[in-house]
Amino acid sequence: MSSDTSRLRVAMVGTRGVPAHYGGFETAIEEIGSRLAERGVEVTVYCRPHDEQRPETHRGMRLVHLPALRVKVGETLSHTALSALHMLRASRYDAVFVFNAANAPFLPLLRCSGTGVAVHVDGLEWKRSKWDGKGRAYYRWAEQASVRGADALIADARGIADYYRSEFDAATRLLTYGAPETEDIGSDKLGEVGLSRDGFHLVVARFEPENHVDLILKAYRESNSRLPLAVVGSAPYAEAYTERIRALAESDSRIKLMGGVWDQGLLNQMYTHARTYLHGHSVGGTNPSLLRAMGAGTAVLAYDVVFNREVLGEESGRYFSSVESLAESLVVLDSDPVLSSRLGRAAQERAQGLYRWDEVAEGYLTLARDLATGKSTRNPKATRNPHSAWTADTALSPLALPFGEEETKQAISGIKTRTRRINIRGLQTAASTGTARTRLTSRFRPESAVTGNANSASLTDIETKKIKE
C-alpha cells in the first residue's frame, strides 16, 4: 500500500464484527481493516455482541458494539439500522463499506451525510432454500436497491460480477478474499478430538441445503471410505435439515459430527491435516472456507458450480455434482495419498498466487479513496434485465422501488414515518465508549421501528437536504 492515508476515515458495517469468530465477512473485515489501520486509516467496525467481552479496539480498529435482535430475519437488519443511526450521530466518515446486500434499505440513511457508500453484495442469497417466497423476493429487491442506492458495488467473484452486469448492466469492483498462510501448523490438537494427521476427510459448512452436506454424507456412506469423516458446522435456523444430517450420521459410526469449532488453532490443524476437504457450497461467490483449505494445501473435492471452478481452477481439484461422482472421487483419494498430496500442493500454489490479503486490502484502500473524492457508479433508475440468462424464476420478478434523488428523499421520509423512536442517549454513549446500552423494545421489521425510552429523538429530526447527489 502506498501514499498517505492518515486522514481517511472508514466504517465497516453489516456483519457480526471482529474479532472474527464466524464467517467470511468477519474474516475479511479483520484482515482488510487491520491492514488499512496499519497504513494510518482510521477504521471503525460495527459489531454485534456475542459474549461478555466488549473490546474497544482490535488490531488497530475502533469497535462500536450495538445490540441486535436474535431472530433469523431481524438480526442483521436490526443491527445495521442501529449502526446507520449511530453513524448519523458520529463524526462523518469518508467511506462506508456495507457488507451484505440485504442491508440495502439503510443506504439512503447512510448517504444522508454525503458519505460515499459501497455495498459488498455477497452471493446469490435469494437462491437459498431457507428463504420462503417473501424472503427470496426481498433479496431480489435488495439487489436492485443496492444498484440504485450504493455509490459502488463490490463483487468477490467474477461470477457475481457477471451476474450484476447481466441483470442490471451494473459495474462492480472485483475484490476477492485472501487465502490464509498456514505453514508449520502442528497436529497436537487433533488427538483431542479423535483425529490423526492425514487420517480423515473434512467438511466445514453451515447446515443448509445449498451447502449439500446431506449429499456429502450420502456419498461418503456409499464410498466405504477407510478414513473417518469429520463434519464441522451447525445451523441455528434450520432444524429440519440439521435433523436430516444427524440421522445420516447416526447410522454410520465413521461420521463424526463436531458442531461448531471455535478453537481456531484446532480448526487450522483440521484444514491442514485432512486427507481431503469436501466443499458443497453452491450459491456464494469466493468462499473463504474453500480458500482456507487451499491455503492449507489440502486436496479439495468441490461442488461443480461456476464460483467454485473460478477459485479452485481446472487442474487444482476435483468436482462433483451427484452422490455417485463424489463417492467415486472419495474412493480414489482415500486410497491414494500421493495423488491427494499433489492436488493439495497445486491448490495451495494457486491460492498463494491469486488470493493475497495485501492485494485485496489495496483494492479496498483504492475504493475508499474514490468514495472519499465523490466518485460514484450509482444508477438510481436501474432495472432488472428480464432477458438475463441468470433470471430463471419468473415468479421473482423485480419489485419496483424508487431510488432517484427525489425518490430517495421519499424513501427516507417513509422510514422516518414508520420508525418510532431510537435511544439516542445510548448511541451517544456508544460514540464515546465504543459500547451501547440501547435496548430494543419492539419487534423489528424492515419497514417498522426500533424503540427506546422517553429520552429519544425521532428520525424526523434527520436532515435530508444533505443527501449526496
Image (tube, rainbow, N blue to C red):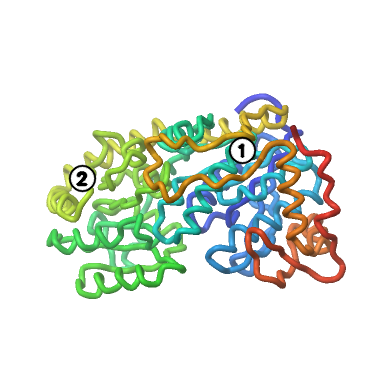
Query: Would you say 34 lies left or right of 9 here?
Result: left
The answer to which quarter of the image holds residue 392 is top left
Find residue 148 and name its label.
1
Query: Which is nearer the N-term, disc 2 or disc 1?
Result: 1
Q: Looking at this rendering, what residue extends furthest in the top direction?
A: 3
Q: Is residue 282 left or right of residue 434?
A: left
- Give the camera-side residue of 173 and 55: 173
CA gap, disc 2 and disc 1: 46 Å
Is residue 157 something that shows in the picture? Answer: no
Residue at the spot x=33%, y=42% of the render? 308
Q: What type is the residue that disc 1 sits on?
A: Arg
Q: From this view, report whether residue 22 is shown above or below residue 288.
A: below
Q: Quadrant of the C terminus?
A: top right
Q: Is residue 299 visible?
A: yes
Element assignment for label 1: helix
Residue 386, percent across and down?
44, 37
What residue type is disc 2 on? Ser
Q: Residue at x 53, y 31 (%)?
A: 170
Name the foreground residue: 225 vs 437. Answer: 437
**Near-viewer residue (110 or 31):** 110
Residue 340: mark in rendering? 2
The percent coordinates of residue 381 (x first, y second) are 61, 34
What number is the disc on residue 73? none
402 vs 386, left or right, is right
Where does residue 225 sit, x and y in percent of width and height? 15, 60
Disc 1 packing (10 Å; few <14; some 14–19; many ≥20): many
Q: Is residue 215 above or below residue 319?
A: below
Mark 2 surroundings within 10 Å by alpha-carbon count, few (fewer than 14), some (14 through 19), many (20 or more) = many
Residue 459, compared with residue 175, is above or below; it is: below
Helix, strand, or loop for circle 2?
A: helix
Which residue is rendered at x = 30% and y = 70% of the image? 244
Q: Residue 94: horizontal and vertical position, in percent?
A: 73, 36
